[in-house]
Image (cartoon, grey):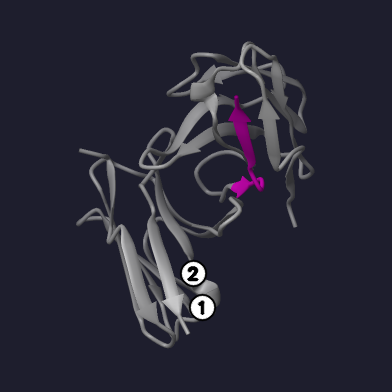
Amino acid sequence: DVKVTQSSRYLVKRTGEKVFLECVQDMDHENMFWYRQDPGLGLRLIYFSYDVKMKEKGDIPEGYSVSREKKERFSLILESASTNQTSMYLCASTPGGTDYGYTFGSGTRLTVV
Amino acid sequence: KNEVEQSPQNLTAQEGEFITINCSYSVGISALHWLQQHPGGGIVSLFMLSSGKKKHGRLIATINIQEKHSSLHITASHPRDSAVYICAVWAQKLVFGQGTRLTINP
């Protein structure tokens, strides 16, 4: 089975801290995605990547950056965490195209205090 | 108006009941996904379909491309089916519905 592993299930950080959320997939998927999920707003795309060292902004990229130095790893970076970035963060991967399902990680619930 | 609308938003039923969750979308799509999210956050992909019907165990998903509508059915529902069910459509990116919170009481 494809696995998408997110490094932390729960994280508490202070306002202004730099935060790294890590996502690793083990099936050589081309595409990786970072979403945040908030009550009443559903899942919203932050950034995605179709290849190593390639990144594209999603719908809500402000306050975030990403890094994809290796195919299997896609990192989400909060340069200076703020309380409005308290959310559930979900990573997903897919082999590409429209003919494949998405595999999601277990999520990281980030609280910024 | 959201591009993907699910109904109902919340559904509570008794064990054994037949469950239907609906998804309507307003954009042209190439595929539709049904996802399941249990408390704790992880999301599991249940189905991806672009036409017709798919079945997996007690779960059945149908799609009508002309009417831009999909349904997820659960037969003989069980408390372990309690979760949030999310419809998502691929329209140059994945667009998600708000989710339907299903609670099955024993």
Q: Quadrant of residue B6?
A: bottom left
* Residues beneath discs 1 and 2 located on the same chain: yes
> Looking at numbered disc 1 in the image, what kind of residue is underneath it?
Pro
Q: Residue at x 68, y 31 (%)?
A: A12
Tag 2, which chain?
B
- Image quarter of the N terminus of chain A: bottom right
Q: How many marks?
A: 2
> Looking at numbered disc 2 in the image, what kind of residue is underneath it?
Ser
Judge from the rendering whether residue B23 lies leftward or rightward of residue A108; answer left or right: left
Instruction: Report if residue A106 lies within the magenta region.
Output: yes
Q: What range is drawn magenta here?
A: A103-113
Q: Quadrant of residue B63?
A: bottom left
Tell me where residue A22 appears, x and y as whole percent: 74, 30
Tell me where residue B85 appears, x and y as whole percent: 44, 59
Classify mark 2: helix, strand or loop: loop
Q: Which mark is residue B82?
A: 2
Tell me where residue A94 appears, x and y as whole percent: 62, 42
Q: Which mark is residue B79?
A: 1
Q: Residue at x 36, y 42 (%)?
A: A40
Q: In this orientation, which residue lies closer to the viewer: B58 or A21? A: A21
- Image quarter of the C terminus of chain A: top right
